[in-house]
Image: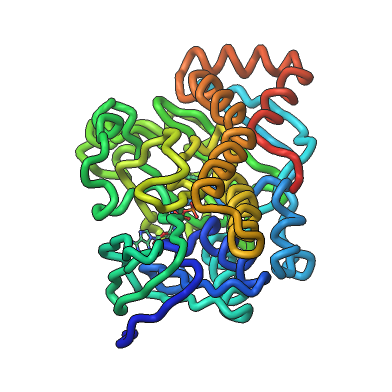
Amino acid sequence: METQTKSYDCGIIGGGLAGLCLAIQLADRGISVVLFEKNQYPFHRVCGEYISMESWDFLKGLGLELDEMYLPKINQLGISSEKGFMLEHTLQLGGFGISRFSLDHSLAQIATKKGVNVVEQCRVNALSENGLDGFDIKTTQGDFQTKILCGSYGKYTPQFLSVGQNHAEENDGRNFIGVKYHIKPQLPDNRIELHNFQDGYCGISKVDHDWHCLCYLTTAKNLQENGKDIKRMEQAVLYKNPFLKAYFTNAEFVNPHPLVISNVHFSRKQTEMKGILLLGDAAGSITPLCGNGMSMGMRASKILANELIRYFEKGQSKAALAANYKNAWNNAFRSRITAGYYLQGLFGKRNTTDIALKTLAQMPGLTNKLVSLTHGDRF
Ligand SMILES: Cc1cc2nc3c(=O)[nH]c(=O)nc-3n(C[C@H](O)[C@H](O)[C@H](O)COP(=O)(O)OP(=O)(O)OC[C@H]3O[C@@H](n4cnc5c(N)ncnc54)[C@H](O)[C@@H]3O)c2cc1C
């Protein structure tokens, strides 16, 4: 517990990928950073754990020794329909697999080594602008002051920020749940599979620890209609896809109990709220089938770090910092997000998905185009 108010150049709320990557880049430039994370590393998260190759060089540049981690490189994609058709495709850029348990922990260790004050088991509860052009931050580990504050708190806006916000999207029927297991199936290390079922889809691909990640997204309605019982829903809904039924019944489950999150919404939000600069899912999230949220969060951290360095080193004003970041964020992600919303309509439906996959199987060029819309260039 911090007893005195400590002052830093930059505070970061949330130590997922976006926040940790931002912290490391700022520390590399000698900017003092405090990062607040309510959990303690290492810990598991609901995430498909497939990272687009676009982020490989960036992560290495932060000091993560990816080449020595012998991670699975993934370049084969299979997408199945509930009716049992499998589209086969070779990924041009592809990706790699690493558990969030390992990845976030390694990044937190790098951040600490570089001088970031990573405060774990520390929830930010309240904040206010302090009249000195900075912020007073109240946390479960004491009070802090920062000149700049960034929000990388993920998909759930903290209550102290959401007061007075519009919550219409939370009641619009597009309320999802995410479920994740680590399993040991018969599936090649270089292959990712996406299996459709009614109102949802499930990804399976290899990560570290000799595990595969099995992670699915479906509507809260699907769960409600099955008595809020995950197992019952899996048997009644997911098992209708014969590939999924085979994985659930034949694979070894590392832990029989899944990690589950609810109240998941996918929408564009904003890059600034109440003077706080937002990145990662806090600024907007995309369905995992339509984009690579982790790579988007990391790319946003690079864009924001560049603008913050101009603020701290070159005297860029706060207003210019916020405006330049917003423009750069829009340029980087606008078309990816728009494409994602259209693509989403093709998945999670029994007949439409089956017809779409059979059509794409005849048109590999178009499949390439669609897949490339969900990945960005290397950065
Ligand atoms: C089902 C599902 C599958 C997915 N699969 C993939 C995939 O395969 N590939 C991919 O690229 N993306 C995937 N994504 C998206 C990806 O998980 C997110 O885009 C990514 O985790 C966002 O990172 P972030 O740093 O913004 O947020 P997060 O990783 O969510 O981190 C936010 C952190 O902030 C902390 N926090 C929140 N509030 C506070 C507070 N008040 N005080 C202190 N700490 C706080 C939280 O504890 C958390 O650690 C998936 C998403 C879902 C839902």
**Along the horizontal axis of the image, is 20 left or right of 97?**
left
Q: Position of residue 52 (x, y in %)?
A: 68, 45
Instruction: Give 1 or 241, whichever is nearer the viewer.
Output: 1
Residue found 51% across the figure and 60% down from its top: 19
Residue 186 visible to the viewer: no
* Relative height, residue 126 to residue 275 (above, below): below
Q: Position of residue 66 (x, y in %)?
A: 74, 65
The residue furthest bottom is: 3
Instruction: Give 353 or 50, whichever is nearer the viewer.
Output: 50
Residue found 23% across the figure and 35% down from its top: 224
Q: Position of residue 166 (x, y in %)?
A: 26, 34
Residue found 53% across the figure and 55% down from its top: 183
* Relative height, residue 86 to residue 73 (above, below): above
Give the total of numbered labels. Answer: 0
Quadrant of the rendered structure where residue 357 is?
top right
Quarter of the picture containing the N terminus is bottom left
**Along the horizontal axis of the image, is 192 left or right of 164?**
right
Residue 138 visible to the viewer: yes
* Relative height, residue 319 to residue 15 (above, below): above
How is the protein colored in the picture? rainbow
Quadrant of the rendered structure where residue 349 is?
top left
**Along the horizontal axis of the image, is 61 left or right of 43?**
right
* Relative height, residue 314 to residue 321 (above, below): below
Residue found 49% across the figure and 35% down from its top: 287
Quadrant of the rendered structure where residue 356 is?
top right
Q: Position of residue 292 (x, y in %)?
A: 59, 41
